[in-house]
Image: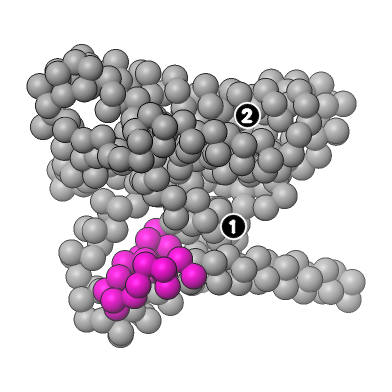
Amino acid sequence: MTTLVRRTRNLLGSEIAGSVVAFVLVVVIFGLASPQFLSRATFGSVAFQLPELGLLTLAMLLPILTGGLNLAITFTANIAGLTVAWTLQANGGVDAGPGSFLLGVALALAAGAASGVVMGLVIAYTKAHPILVSLSMMIFLRGLGEFLTRGGDVSGFPAFLRPFGHGSVVGIPLPLLIFILCVALWHVLLSRTRLGFNTYMIGSNIEAARYSGVNTRRVIVLVYTLSGAMCAVAGIIMLARFNSVRVGHGESYLLITVLACFLGGVNPFGGFGRVIPVFAALVVLQLFSSGLNLLGANQHLATAVWGILLVGVMMLRWLAGHFRTVLRRKE
């Protein structure tokens, strides 16, 4: 039995353990508080709501692993969604065909990647702090979106887009399948490619990575480019789910993506973190959000809870590191 536990821990990693404990606590607490929590409807709702937050979290993950941050993820996603919306409207709106949608998707991915390229170039070549650079991009994209839409929504899309936000394949929500595919892609990228290895190296020590022959500038630009492209995927899914786009959709997701990364064992200073534990943390956070909704919690209260959780996670991580240091000294 002990051998089985040890093998399971080695296979999944210690980061999963925290998410498993959190999952059990959330299910037990909210299951006792609300009899509707442990229902098929709740888990179905989680399955449809998880992808948009999950895709944005994947977009946040890569920059954090390099020791950076991308504060512009939600606005990049919305600009990408607006790009698709404008392309469809220019080709007939509700009567636009699949070809127009594919063109819009290509332009949206290009817009998201372009946002990442600009941030990556500025960070890599000027050595400006990623927080300042991504904050500047966030302000720019928000202002641009507000100017182009005059603060309103863009809606009126073809009916064939609805399955991308609400459809299912063999009982599994299509957005969830897209998200799982992106999780698998990010997992392979980080664990099986040179870019993934170099990303961890830069996050651990960028100067050591440079002296080891890693083209750190190129890696940073690629990381932020991929982050922007993943934001675009999230923006397209959000367009299909809400059947409308506006520049302020999902602003509260920014805090939760950072929380999901930290809860999933990602080092906030870069260099360490895996995709699968972050995926597990996302499931826990989405269940927690659904539990709060069932209890009738106000949205502003839920946002406050996210902030408290973020501070709590960081304190627990510090305490765990402190105790590990004390134990090593005793040994």
- Magenta stretch holds residue 291: yes
Q: Which mark is residue 119?
A: 2
Could you tell me which residue is drawn at 49 percent across and 66 percent down? 306
| Viewer-proximal residue among 129 and 23 | 129
Mark 2: secondary structure: helix
Colour setting: one colour
Amino acid carrying mark 1 in the image: Phe
Could you tell me which residue is drawn at 59 percent across and 23 percent down? 117
Quadrant where the image shows the C terminus: bottom right
Residue 133, image quadrant: top right
Question: With respect to residue 149, does 298 lie above or below?
Answer: below
Instruction: Decide: few, some or many residues near mark 2? Use Cα within 10 Å; few <14, some 14-19, many ≥20.
Output: many
Q: Is residue 168 left or right of residue 200?
A: left
Dominant secondary structure (helix, strand or loop) of the stretch shown in magenta: helix
Could you tell me which residue is drawn at 45 percent across and 23 percent down? 111
Could you tell me which residue is drawn at 23 percent across and 65 percent down? 42
Q: Is residue 120 left or right of residue 281?
A: right
Q: Position of residue 89 (x, y in %)?
A: 21, 22
Residue 329, image quadrant: bottom right
Residue 26, image quadrant: bottom left
Question: With respect to residue 113, does 184 lie above or below?
Answer: below
- Magenta stretch holds residue 25: no
Range of residues picked out in magenta: 283-304
Mark 1: secondary structure: helix
Q: Which residue is mark 1?
A: 262
Of label 1 and label 2, which has the lower sequence position? Answer: 2
